[in-house]
Image (cartoon, rainbow, N blue to C red):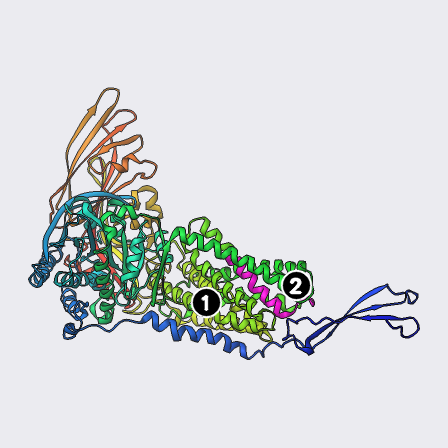
Amino acid sequence: MEKHNGGFEEDRLSEKVESPNGNGNEKDTLQLVTERIDPEEGCSNETLIDIREKKSSPKQLEWYYAPAYLLFWVGLFFAVCYPLFNYLPTGVTIEEESNSPGTFVAQRAESILVQLDLMGPKIAGDYVTEVLMVEFLLNEISKVREEMRDDLYEMEVDVQRSSGAFLHWQMINMYQGIQNVVVKLSSKSSNSSSYLLVNSHYDSKPSSVGTGDAEVMVVTMLETLRLMATSEEPFLHPIVFLFNGAEEQPFHGSHSFISNHRWSANCKALVNLDSAGAGGREILFQGGPNHPWLMKQYKKSAKHPFATTMAEEIFQADLIPSDTDFRIFRDFGPVPGLDMAGCYNGFVYHTKFDRLKVISRRALQNTGDNVFSLVRSISNAEEMYDTEAHSEGHSVFFDYLGLFFVYYTESTGTALNISFSLGAILVICLSLWRMARVTDQRVGTYARAFGMQFLLALLGFLLALGFPLLMSVFYDAGDRTMTYFSNSWLVIGLFICPSVIGLVLPATLYLSLRPSEKIPHTYHLQIVGHAYCVLMAVLCILLTAVGIRTAYLFMMCVFFYLGALIINLASRLHDKGYLWAWVLGVCQVLPYLYFTYLFHALLVITIPMTSRKGMEANPDLLISLECALGSILAMVFLAPLLNLFRRPKCMVGGLALVMFIFCMISVSEVGFPYRAETNVMRLHFLEVHRKFYEYDGSISLEDSGYYFDLQDRRFEAPLVDKINLTGLTRLDEQCKTEMYCGMPCFNHRWCLAVKDARWLPREEPVDLPGTPILRLQNKTVLGTVTAPSVRYHFIVSDGPPRMSFFIQPLNGVKMLSWSFLQGMLDNPSVYKPPYHIFFGYGSDNSPVEFSLDMTKDDGNFDGPLLELGISGHYMSHLSKRDAATQKFIEDLPDFAHPMEWPSSYERYIF
């Protein structure tokens, strides 16, 4: 060791360490220099001087590449996801059938659909539905019988007519003379007693022909029946095709079959077919429950898969204003199955625009391919012999861009979610240790940096959710909901941009402050991703713990980030500038495509539903939440990479500018929700004539008017300047004195919303097609001196195919029993007066008889005991509307689609 300069002793130690900002070459050597200083100089014995003799850190990319970066991901969605979502196979023609035997022929199904479309609306109880439709179906089935291979198969056909009742929602649902056309097709070589049930309905709503909902499914079933009956390959299990005639009542046809038909007890699996739109693909949105083998059959057979667990959980959480026969088969069978429904173009659902012209042959081919393949697969499934033995819990299921289908059991999903989440956390810890080692810093330095970024990630997640939700609240406060209804692209600026801003804002502001010179920018940016990954992992574990199977979305996020991180660590790109970002970007392509595809599908399904979501809830909350979740899942690791570019705050400002421009557009005429024919305002109203009879038989009130059950959050505002609504009032005051506000609310949903309904009186009495006649047959005092009771026996005759009875015992009176379903009275904590009994009939219009048994606290039955309301609903398009009603309908703006009918309401006191 040499001495230099009068006693100064210097030791130089050089260590070559790979820099996180370079490639570890000679120019990027970090030299650690230790100098011993003479104590006489007044300095410490030993000082560590870091001399970084290396080229400058890798520079961030120029700011003008940032817009191209974002546009690349937008373009990727439109180049890949959008066309795949809208893809439909070419329809097979009858001429091509010989070249592809055993293939669903869309042209043949379409030819039947043309005939059904021309028949017009099919309301249960009408001649068209109860006579013509039954004859039509029997004729089509007889054509299949003529083609059937008699040496291989046998066919039984039954027209079921039955009566019954069940509790549904908050009412008793009664039916009488409901008709179903039922076909059982069996292989002669089979001795199986387990049947596959395939169901759809042929009735429709008032004013709607129902071509999409659900005659498309009816013709699909007919063609599937033909293909199965003419196949050269017999199947193991008999197939029951149920063409039910009263789904829209609601659910009378399905309950009639599952409760009363001789074949129902043998039905062990179900394929339920329905629609909430017209054209496009059908989605599998419910399965099982607890029968994952059905998903295996779907995976094996579906040619064009479209399904997601998320849709199932949204639907079963009652966030969707629809229901299907699947509920009836599940609850009253119970029969496990698959629930599939058309979901495209829900704007025409239950309107007069649900016609053949909006349904392409390609859409028929898509549905037909899937249904036929699925029916053939399940009818040959070994699990059908003993379905209970294969009841193994719920499934997690989804398709990937319509290209293939993935499913696994819920228990497997739990294991995957927890394993990948914990694995990601461990590898992130390894990454942080690696960073500390490479930069010769303490692990605690990086732990503190990670802790800060995790808090910022949590803030970013909350902002990404909160900003869109806040936008929806502001728009609702300004009476501007549903601005995206006709122009769905507006959600990009209204909800998606705010979500991306929220996601990237905290980290961007933090990094711009240069928080630590000890940690290079490239590592800081990686830590941002690590923090979001841990947050996704924690959310995945929490959702899994509470049994939400949609947690698979967060697992997918974690899985692909984990894969990118492992690749970066293994290849050492982790420590070489920003090269790790390329690996991350490439690994995010697959999840990005899936998440944008999935949430685009959800928006396509749910945006049309906002027009029938009701008046209470702000529909923008659901749409903004979907946009926020989709943006977070798709961009959670991609949005922070904006910090790869210079001036990232300017890019955030650019997104804010886009948001502002879209907001300005949305409050213009472009943002008016409704358009004639394509995006209509649903206007549900009844032309009502009311009579209120008092106890002595006198009439205290008789009037007429229009009872509006408004369907969306815009209320009556779009109509105010278009038609004369003078006198339109809320029903608040009447609700204080009359049961159900003195209105003939049609079903449970109408009755729930009656307090928010509107009443428009009119001078001319409504000219009703008829009025139900109520007769008190007798009043009998029963019981003993200590427990007296009284029985009223009533008959209602001459009523329309749909009626409601409302029963309200007066103060001090208790309903003991009645001739209706007793379950409502047996559960007083669930079912409270006024009681609602809905009654519908099909081919049998016999009078309705019922009795009520009551008791009274003081035992005096000479005075008033109950209020009884009777409403008759003349829903058929064949029921004549009077001149004033026709004039009112003609004056409606072209964007308003009325679903209306005359209705009577009589309130009695007995």
Is 519 contained in the magenta span?
Answer: yes
Tell me if residue 640 can be seen: yes
Give the residue type that dot 1 points to: Leu
Q: Residue at x 59, y 72 (%)?
A: 649
**Can you give x and y, in whole percent of width and height, for residue 617 in the image?**
39, 55
Separation of residues labelled 2 and 1 (CA atoms): 42 Å
Q: Indicate whether residue 742 is drawn in magenta.
A: no
Q: Position of residue 784 (x, y in %)?
A: 22, 21
- Magenta stretch bounds: 516-537
Q: Which residue is mark 1?
A: 494
Amino acid type shown at disc 2: Ala
Give the residue at mark 2. 436
Q: Main secondary structure of the magenta part?
A: helix
Q: Is residue 657 above or below residue 324?
A: below
At 69% from the left and 63% from the top, the residue drawn is: 441
* Category of crowding for the residue at label 2, using alpha-carbon neighbours closer than 10 angstroms: few (below 14), some (14–19), many (at least 20): many
List x then y, in percent, for residue 839.
Answer: 20, 46
